[in-house]
Amino acid sequence: MSLFGSLTAAISGLTSQSRSLGNISDNIANSQTVGYKRVDTNFVSYITSSSQTNNLPGATIAMPSYTNTVQGTIEQSENPLAMAIGGQGLFSVAQAKGTVNGQPVFDERQFFSRAGDFARDSDGYLTNGSGYYLKGWPVDAGGNPDRTTIEPIRVNQQVFNPIATKQIDLAANLPATMPGSAVTTQAQLYDTLGRLHTVNLMFSPGTSTNHWTLEVVVPDDTVPTTRTVELNFGAGASPAVADGTIGTFGAASAMSVPLTNAVGDPAAVSFSVDFGQGPQDVSLSLGQFGKAVGLTQYAGSEFALRNLTQDGVPLGAFSSLSMRTNGDVAVNYDNGQSRVIARVPLVAFNDPDRLQRLDGQAFMRTPESGEARVTDAASNGVGKLVIGSIERSNVDIASEFSKLIVAQRAYTANTKVVSAADELLQDTINMRR
């Protein structure tokens, strides 16, 4: 029994070391595979019979020991859409199982991956090097993610519609020493079609200090209108305010003024224009009543413009796609605007090492791994997103070669046991002679 037991124990050792060599070979072959997690070998002994006086040879088996929780080296990538996870967590990904009308149809099963070498394919989807599709939360117009659903991210918003100008902000200083003539500056605004129009702002001094008249002239207006409003500064206002600041608006023509003029209230006038698409209301902000912001009147002999901005934008075409550290996927347009179309969450498991491994560095949930918890990056136990980077394999070549030498010697030692047991069995058989 012991001779046969020795033989079978040695044979199980050969099998186990062969499996160990297989794991080592797999690790070395994937040492440069993005997001790959090495497989170590755990040897487990099985006892046939063991007591204080007797121990019969048993066997050993090689069981895989997965290292899904061991971080690989994060390396900077030239791909701006690449992402690495600094810490725990996985990307939620989808797998295509076919196409309908040229568009992919996705497998209903849930897949997960650490391979973040994503790029945009011909259909606008974000896929990694293994062909898995990145999934994310869709967002509403305000950029708020809908955490009740998760779906493959597709970039199909190629145009940013023009936004008509609703507000113009002016910050400037009118000379306290009254000039002999009016001073003029120009603002610009966009209509509903994204066309740019000029707005002339002409400030004329009043008959006395602290009084000015603002005239707004829009040359492209289809209905020519005279728009004027009186501006009263400092002691010229009623009630008086701090010197050099707007206190009240006076008589206005084709312009609306605020109902209140308490200190700190917005000093804004509004007017309407028509560029052939119907009335367009525009607010001209001149700062705050009684505050030295926006339009002021201080010492100086010339008009000094500090800032002049408007909130409209022209038509925009797709320019680029960018990822943000909070997981937002933003489409950038050539008009300087951007739109968030999705947010990439991370997925956590109680025991990630128990996930089922699949082709292409992907995983599936198992009962032993626990339920998938989908959460924002850098929260609830998951790591942060490192943009423009990839996670390399967590294989250490030097360590694998060391394990390779040990496995080779252990395999050779087991062959010696087989040879010795064979010789002893042959001697036993020859005892009849």
Image (spheres, rainbow, N blue to C red):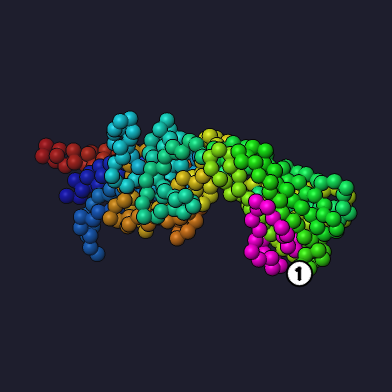
Image position of 353 (left or right of 170): left
Closer to the camera in the image, 294 or 123: 294
Image position of 415 (left or right of 144): left
Where residue 323 sits in the image (x, y, percent)? Answer: 52, 44
Quick one: label 1, few (<14), some, or many (20+) residues within 10 Å? Answer: few
Where residue 102 sits in the image (x, y, percent)? Answer: 33, 30
Closer to the camera in the image, 207 or 156: 207
* Segment tinted magenta in the rendering: 246-266
Q: Is residue 392 magenta?
A: no
User: Compared to 54, does 421 lie above or below?
Assistant: above
| Residue 10 visible from this viewpoint | no
Closer to the camera in the image, 49 or 32: 32
Where residue 242 sits in the image (x, y, percent)? Answer: 80, 66
| Extreme residue toward the left, this view | 432
In the picture of the structure, the residue carrying the numbered disc 1 is 239
User: Compared to 291, does 170 lie above or below?
Assistant: above
Q: Residue at x 38, y 35 (%)?
A: 131
Q: Amino acid at mark 1?
A: Pro
Residue 14 sits in quarter: top left
Image position of 300 (left or right of 21): right
Closer to the camera in the image, 210 or 157: 210
Where residue 296 sits in the image (x, y, percent)? Answer: 78, 57
| Residue 138 visible from this viewpoint | yes
User: Compared to 34, does 234 lie above or below?
Assistant: below
Image position of 151 (left or right of 45): right
Q: Secondary structure at mark 1?
A: loop
Q: Is residue 253 magenta?
A: yes
Q: Residue at x 53, y 34 (%)?
A: 317
Quadrant containing the C terminus is: top left
Residue 224 sits in quarter: top right
Q: Residue at x 32, y 47 (%)?
A: 110
Q: Residue at x 74, y 56 (%)?
A: 230
